[in-house]
Amino acid sequence: MDHLLIRKFRHRLLAWLHRSRSGRVFFVRRIPYKDVKRATDGFQRVIYSNSEVTAYAARFGEGGGGVFLVKEVKDFGQQNDVFCRQIQFLGRLHHRHLLSLKGFSVGKHKRLLIFDNIENGSLKEHLNDPLKTPLNWRTRLQIANEVVAALEYLFLFSDPPAYHVSISSSNIMLDENFAAKLSDFSLLTPSTNSVMMPNSGDSMKQKSCKIIFQLGVLILELVTGQSSEMEGSDLIPWIQQSRFYNSIDKMIDPDLGNNYDCTELKNLLAVAKLCIKSRDKATFTISQLFRYLQRKIDISHDKVR
């Protein structure tokens, strides 16, 4: 029943947004290719790379404008109309936990998207790099909530919904206040050059299963400080054990010491376990997950990160 009410509310809200946006033209600045190449040190400052995109850190000007994220999208080829529709879609998205599109650039063989400030780099750096400041418990809880809030926006309030969304510690960026920003989302289907409008219920369910599973892996990384991408990683087998609670002390990130709430930790791991089980069949929606986290984990803005 709650899910039906949410869907009904979504349709009414989207209709209002369409009326309020009538006639509006979305303008995105075109940035000279030579400036982007210089800002990325000749595209050498790679943050992450996958089959869809390669993301670079960029610093424009004399370094006073902060660090930005530049994404080279690999699948556009010469289809400029597809690239333009992608820019229009990304330009419409506005959420405090999504990287905002600031501009685009076109080179001879490159299609580039320039996104907002990523002053503190990726989440993965802060979990795995000993030279980075360790994240405290409150910050890790906040990041989990912020990621789910961004997913809820992309699936429920974006019209059309984002078709490609991927979350990992590598592609979640942290701003100057250590707020989480999703960076890997688009209107394009993975490994295609077509813009898709996912109306199929089965398609949306499959996508939700994949994202919820990725969220479970991300929560495990937040708790343990381990990378799921490392060879020999046993995060998923561990959480699938019936008595995994007995070995929490061995798995929790040593950087946390004893500075965490045991009840919050168990609640967060319970969510991770449910998410991992959803790889094949999701038992709850992103919205339900967000509400559960809000109820179970107290995130107060007056608490220091």
Image (cartoon, rainbow, N blue to C red):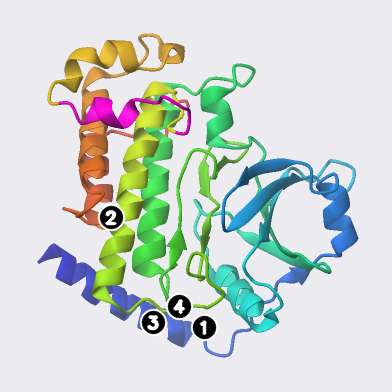
Q: Do the residues labelled 4 and 2 touch (CB within 8 Å)?
A: no
Residue most extreme to the left? 1
Label 2 sits on residue: 209
In the rendered image, which quarter is residue 214 located in?
top left
Question: At 45% from the left edge and 84% from the top edge, which residue is drawn?
Answer: 18
The answer to which of marks 4 and 2 sits earlier in the sequence is 4
Whole-number angstrom distance, CA of label 4 to CA of label 2: 19 Å
| Residue matched to label 3 | 16
Residue at the disc numbered 4: 196
Q: Which residue is drawn at 85% across and 53% down?
A: 37
Which numbered disc flags the more N-terminal residue, 4 or 3?
3
**Picture coordinates of residue 87, whole percent (x, y):** 63, 72
Per the model, the C-alpha gap separating discs 1 and 4 is: 22 Å
The front one of 13 and 283 is: 283
Answer above or below: position of 153 versus 179. Answer: below
Q: Residue at x 49, y 64 (%)?
A: 190
User: What kind of residue is marked 2?
Assistant: Cys
Measured as percent of width and height from the top left, residue 27 is found at 69, 76
